[in-house]
Image (cartoon, rainbow, N blue to C red):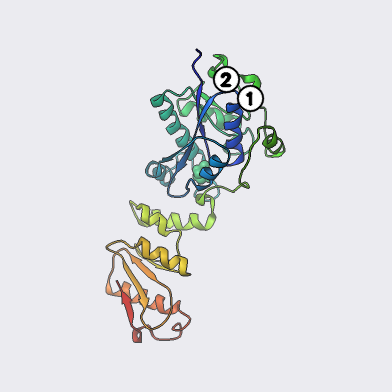
Amino acid sequence: MKKKVRALVLFSGGLDSTLAVKVLEKQNIEVLALTFVGYFFGDTKAKESAEKNGIQMRSINFAEIHCEVVKNPKRGYGRAMNPCIDCHLLMIREAGKIMRAEGYDLVATGEILGQRPMSQNLQSLKIIEKETGLEGRLLRPLSAKLLDETEIEKQGLVSREQLLDISGRSRKRQIELVQELDIKYYPSPGGGCLLTEMEFGKKLKKLLAEIKRPSASDFALLQVGRIFWIDKTRIIVGRNSVDNEKLGELQETEDKLLELQDFSGPLVLVRGKITEDIMNEAKKITAKYSRYTKELDYKKLIFKIK
Ligand code: SF4
């Protein structure tokens, strides 16, 4: 009996990667969707999409190696702190390792020629293939007919005839395919991960400049409250009850957590070198961000510190 062709597909849960899975499944290829999880993006969207579309999915946590790419991307950043080309390369490279280790035949992505000017032009697509060591085994099912024929197509493992010729930024063709390929669910297109957000990018840049080896919890803290830096120490003020709860959860042994004893106000976390001056600054800030004490002298207030 002919062995079933097995493919790994990089899967974000969005429409393009869902289409890539379905185009291959239509050819009776066995597909495992791979979703990468790091400090700046999770797999919630992908899980939901996989479940609703009956796609077999595996999450791969590559936070540590991804973080190295974020700190020092060979090809630089996009508009914010998003190293999209290197990040994408890393995901494909990791998928390639799984392909070889587990005997898959190919790696596929939902990339579309010309959809993203920087990372999905003809030259970038070729560079990705070469740099990941996946020459001939990397397939872009949605644009394949516009690209050179791959080894896997030449060997007849994948029928080129049944692949697509989509290019450009319009989503018209993809939307038409939703019905054709019986796709039950896809989320509205998102702009990218946290790293593509300008404000977050600024905070991350500062963290990387001040802290040599940031921890998972340092990255998580970037997403909470208002951050004040005093040298290498952070004072983080919760803006609402959700922030306050998160600050409590993220507190580590060396951190201090402050709040006003007799008034409602924010929780404030201090991380870094803790001196008397820093604690006074933290108290001042804590008092300033409570509407009951913002006009009062912080030295006359009592703080709970743990
Ligand atoms: S948007 Fe984020 S997850 Fe996507 S390629 Fe860019 S850096 Fe990587």
Q: Earlier in the sequence, mark 1 or mark 2?
A: 2
Residue 83 in view, yes or no:
no
| Label 1 neighbour load within 10 Å: few <14, some 14-19, many 20+ | many
Q: Is residue 112 left or right of residue 252?
A: right
Residue 283, placed above or below residue 105 = below
Of 67 and 45, the residue lying toward us: 45
Looking at the rendered structure, the kind of residue marked 2 is Val
Q: Position of residue 221 (x, y in %)?
A: 41, 59
Q: Which quarter of the figure is the C terminus placed in?
A: bottom left
Q: Position of residue 185 (x, y in %)?
A: 62, 42
Residues at marks 1 and 2, CA–CA distance in whole angstroms = 9 Å
Q: Residue at label 2?
A: 158
Q: Residue at label 1?
A: 163
Residue 16 in view, yes or no:
yes
Of 177 and 282, the residue lying toward us: 177
Q: Residue at x 54, y 55 (%)?
A: 198
1 and 2 marks in contact (CB < 8 Å): yes
Residue 73, placed above or below residue 208 = above
Q: Residue at x 50, y 35 (%)?
A: 56
Q: Position of residue 100 (x, y in %)?
A: 41, 24
Looking at the rendered structure, the kind of residue marked 1 is Leu
Q: Could you tell me how many numbered marks the image carries?
A: 2
| Label 2 neighbour load within 10 Å: few <14, some 14-19, many 20+ | many
